[in-house]
Image: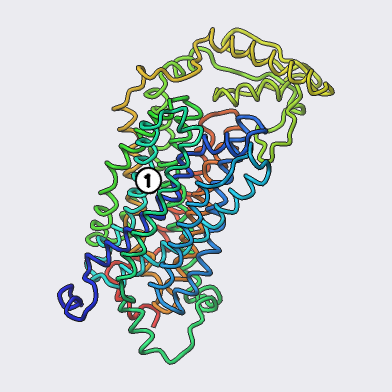
Amino acid sequence: MSEQATKDAGEPGLKTVVGASAAGTAFEWYDFFIFGSLTTIIARHFYADVGEATSYILALLTFGVGFVVRPLGALVFGWFGDRTGRKTTFLVTITLMGVATVAIGLLPDYGQIGIVAPILLLLMRVLQGFALGGEYGGAAIYVAEHAPAKKRGFLTGWIQTTAAIGLIMALSVILVTRAILGTEAFDEWGWRVPFLLSAFLLAISLWIRLKLHESPAFTRMVAESTERQAPFRESFGTWKVGKFVLIALVGIMFAQGAVWYAGYFYTRFFMERVLKVEVATVDQLILAITVASAFLYVFFGWLSDRVGRKPVMVGGMALFLLAVFPGFHALTQAANPALARAQASSPVTVIADPATCAVQFDPVGKTAFASSCDLAKSVLSNAGVSYDNLAAAPGSLAAVRIGTVEIASVEGAGLDAAALKAARTDVETRIKAALTGAGYPARADAAGVNMLAVFGILMVFMVAATAVYGPQAAALVELFPTRVRYTAMSLPYNVGTGWVGGLLPAASFALVAWSGNIYFGLWYAVAFTAVASVVALIFLPETRGRDLNTIGD
């Protein structure tokens, strides 16, 4: 149906359909990204008694929990979307997301109510993830079911770009609020402002979406169907549809979760926590690349209307695989050249009995890390210093070699709390002094950050991410029949973004802590992307131009 004919029938035109759907989805991404952008501050307020590194890991895991529950939201809201309609379902999801986000801005922190604070924070993240699990599928399907076949990639590309718009909104509000209040006030209480602003965005988004009608494909299906819909049974209990659920998950969403979240979130973590670039500088860089790449989602959606969904998405996967390791090494050179020089001239090695070394990753904050090996490695991990491991004789005292200088650690096992604290301080003081002497910087020199080079490196990752993500909505919608489309596409989407992407920062950090190599965490994203590229090449059908009303019939 043409846009003019749609208007004559009393229904909103394509621009209204796309605009209303995109606005609501951008708001939900805004809500979700505020938390990711404020992880460091949230860690201090809600996990105040477990140490800096552990509190950050716990905050990352809390962020990840919102992604873990997204498949549950996909199943629940997907079922309702296929049974009751697209419009009603995404009105519910946007309301739930808005309420949960505002509530985070009102939560007392650990200093006020103790352990109840992180529990309530976790609950709000669960509600956010549950809501977002149902939002994306509804918005993408709603636009796709209104769009002409030849413009489906282009028009759903606007839904894809809402992730960038939501991140732009989140970072802009954070930067402006911090500039107005000052860093100290923002860190103390001003971080709540971006969450509270969601109340206004929720009201605007609901007002816009209430003007929409049900999608024409769903309306036609209801009018013509004589059978009771069974979205779960048909989507996951039959091979006819189930095989495409698996292909969508492994061949598309594994890559989207890995490439997109590595580009947007792991680069942020890497610059902030490993390269020690100032948070404000990192915010500005992420904001700049997000603005610069926002149009690419629509461009790659448009390109997929001409050359096909599959070649564009697989091209993005290939670019990421080729660029990821050289890109992160170049990022170190550009963002913290002093660190790169120190790593080259004075490499760090931990010499210890492997039996005495624990993995420097403690998601529950209960590990003592008291052995001589653990005390040495914890200092290096907290400092973001890459190190190699060299096995020493059983029972020997651990040491850290920095260039040609060797620093003996202290055995803390068996010491009481006060003595262990003193031992840890002693080891930390001596290792940090040696690192300083070898040229390892405590922070990245702001004047030494090559902003243009960093921007260029990050944009390579953005091109890869947008090439994978831009055509994705159209490709997923076109894989499934109308009667199960919401359910069948929402589950793989949210498993991919929720489990593969959402857990990427914490999992990659754990790999770095396990290995001691600051680049080792990249293997997480590489593995998922490599698997996805092979599956997509072999099994993913080309869906460009399919008639949405006849798929699966």
Q: Quadrant of the N terminus?
A: bottom left
Q: Quadrant of the C terminus?
A: bottom left
* 497 in relation to 288, above or below: below
Q: Nearer the viewer, residue 161 or 12?
A: 12
Residue 347 appears in which quarter of the rendering? top right
Q: Position of residue 194 (x, y in %)?
A: 42, 44
Q: Position of residue 495 (x, y in %)?
A: 52, 58
Q: Nearer the viewer, residue 54 or 357?
A: 54
Q: Nearer the viewer, residue 198 or 170?
A: 198
* 502 in relation to 362, above or below: below
The residue lying furthest to the right in this view is: 414
Total labels drawn: 1
- Coloring basis for residues: rainbow
The residue lying furthest to the bottom in this view is: 226
Q: Is residue 9 left or right of residue 256?
A: left
Q: Residue at x 47, y 19 (%)?
A: 443
* 292 in relation to 448, above or below: below
Q: Residue at x 38, y 28 (%)?
A: 281
Q: Residue at x 36, y 22 (%)?
A: 449
Give amino acid for label 1: Leu
Q: Position of residue 513 (x, y in %)?
A: 61, 32
Query: Local crowd at mark 1 within 10 Å, few (<14), some, or many (≥20)?
Result: many
Residue 432 appears in which quarter of the rendering? top right
Q: Nearer the viewer, residue 421 or 221?
A: 421
Q: In this figure, which residue is indicated by the disc labeled 1? A: 167
SS class, disc 1:
helix
* 322 in relation to 137, above or below: above
Q: Position of residue 406 (x, y in %)?
A: 65, 9
